[in-house]
Image: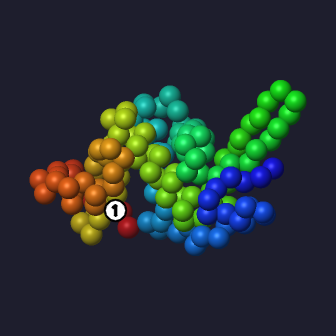
Amino acid sequence: MAKTKLNRCPTCGQSIAEPKSTGYRSQNSKVRGDSAAISEQIEGRWTPDMVYELMKRMAVSEGVYPGIKYKTDKLTLVVPISMADADAVDADGLIKTIQEFADKNNFWLWKYTEDGLSVYRSVGGRTMEEMKKDSPNFDICMRSAKP
């Protein structure tokens, strides 16, 4: 049962990166919120938890989120670690996977800005800030946010 990630001790699997953010407007909230946003746009065929688990599995397969290997005689299964055990680097990898998935499938994502909650479409898996920097005419749809 070895965890596989570059920001972890190769011997024990202990994280050597800073902890992920939690709480209001955190990495944890971003992952859960984006999973819910994608779930809404799939029109109820997948719950937010199902999307969340799928995104973690995709991130593990891309090598940007750690997993635990379970081996049997015929099968090797890699299960994503719990987000509670993830660090900031792991959470960033998962967020990037979600952004790239949203881009490939034309899903909208949400981002808190100083003006409130903004809705945007990720292009090339880039963040809102990266897209604004690359394109001065970048357009976003603003919504009011409940703090």
Q: Residue 19 in the image: x percent, y percent?
A: 59, 70
Front-most of residues 84 and 33: 84
- Relative placement, left or right, of 34 versus 91 is left
Front-most of residues 99 and 64: 64
For the point 36% across and 47% down, which residue is it?
125
The residue tagged 1 is: 112
Q: Residues within 10 Å of mark 1 (few under 14, many from 20)?
A: some
**Height in image: 99 above or below 22?**
above
Tell me, yes or no, if residue 37 can be seen here.
Answer: no
Q: Residue 108 in the image: x percent, y percent?
A: 33, 43
Q: Quadrant of residue 11?
A: bottom right
Amino acid at the residue labelled 1: Tyr
- Relative placement, left or right, of 43 versus 135 is right
For the point 81% across and 50% down, which residue is it?
1
- Relative placement, left or right, of 109 versus 35 is left
Q: Residue 138 in the image: x percent, y percent?
A: 17, 52
For the point 44% across and 66% down, which residue is it?
25
For the point 72% across and 54% down, which residue is it?
3
Q: Quadrant of the C terminus?
A: bottom left
Q: Residue 44 in the image: x percent, y percent?
A: 48, 31
